[in-house]
Amino acid sequence: MPPSPPSPRAQILDRDSQAWLDALRAQGPVRDEAVGRLHSLLLRAARFEVARRRTAMPGWDGDDLDDLALQSADDALVAVLAKLDGFRGQSRFTTWAYKFALLEAAVKMRRRPWQGRELSLEPERWPQIADDATSPQADAEQGELLEAVRRAIDDELTPHQREILVAVALNGVPIDVLAERLECTRGSLYKTIHDARHKLRRRLQADGHRVSGSCGGGLHMSKHPLERGEALRRLLGPSGPELTCEQCFDEIDRYAELALSHGGPRADRAIPGMRAHLEGCQACAEEYDSLRALLERER
């Protein structure tokens, strides 16, 4: 993963963002009113995220989901107020605040269906892999590469790396669920996945296998059975340098605004490593998609 980006220069805040900061740093009724408006803004974002994901919760009624959105907004409010001095002005204040509510709601929605379910971390448990090649030659090449990946997983990865990679990349366990069960952070688990993928690519190249420049995007799908090409993308991930989950969260508001106003290539040049991370980390990619969709709706 790349080194931390240099600290950005101080930004001149837009008028609305400056007004938000002034009000939230004030005293008495002015601050109370601003906190109330901020909570309403965060609740709107949390409800937006819950609505996007509600098909994954068919047994929940509207009241249950609204309670989850309200809890997400409450938690996001605490986080925003605690991190107020960390707002750098590289996006609008409201965009920066939205990402906290979207994160809280997304994590809660991912975790809720897994409550009470046993979580198997068996590294030898591979799902059924279906053929997706368009020709006999391509089928043979994919089969050979997948078998080489299996051997590399057994030979090169630590038991912990095998457990995490197979659980998240192949068995469909959301990374936030796994982080909660293992009492660690999303970022630390993704670092484990990143390091495991690096080991696999290095072994494959040493053995003479041709690996495409980017196998990213595989974590974004949930087909069962997995197709061979998808399984390879999930296991090998993006090849280039990528941000960490923590760096992604720090930059995601600026990236979303740049992508909307100037296009994806401009955003990619401004924040190297972001696109690769979004290709490799499903959770961060989902939250980026939600933030962008919310900003598009408010345009």
Image (cartoon, grey):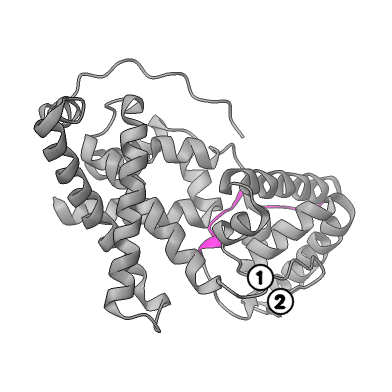
What x and y, as percent, mark residue 66? 28, 68
Residue at the top extreme? Answer: 9
Q: Is residue 246 left or right of residue 14?
A: right
For label 2, the SS is: loop
For the record, the magenta segment spans: 208-220
Q: Is residue 143 left or right of residue 217?
A: right
Q: Which residue occupies the foreground of this view, 32 or 271?
A: 32
For label 1, the SS is: loop
Q: Earlier in the sequence, mark 1 or mark 2?
A: 2
- In the rendered image, the vertical position of residue 244 relative to residue 183, given as above or below: above
Q: Is residue 291 left or right of residue 285?
A: left
Query: Residue 127 shows which numbered tag?
Result: 2
Residue 51 seen in the current view: no
What x and y, as percent, mark residue 102? 35, 53
Instruction: Check contact, mark 1 vs mark 2: CB within 8 A.
Output: yes
Residue 247 seen in the current view: yes
Q: CA distance from mark 1 to mark 2?
A: 7 Å
Q: Tag 2: residue type?
A: Pro
- Residue underneath mark 1: 171
Q: Quadrant of residue 108?
A: bottom left
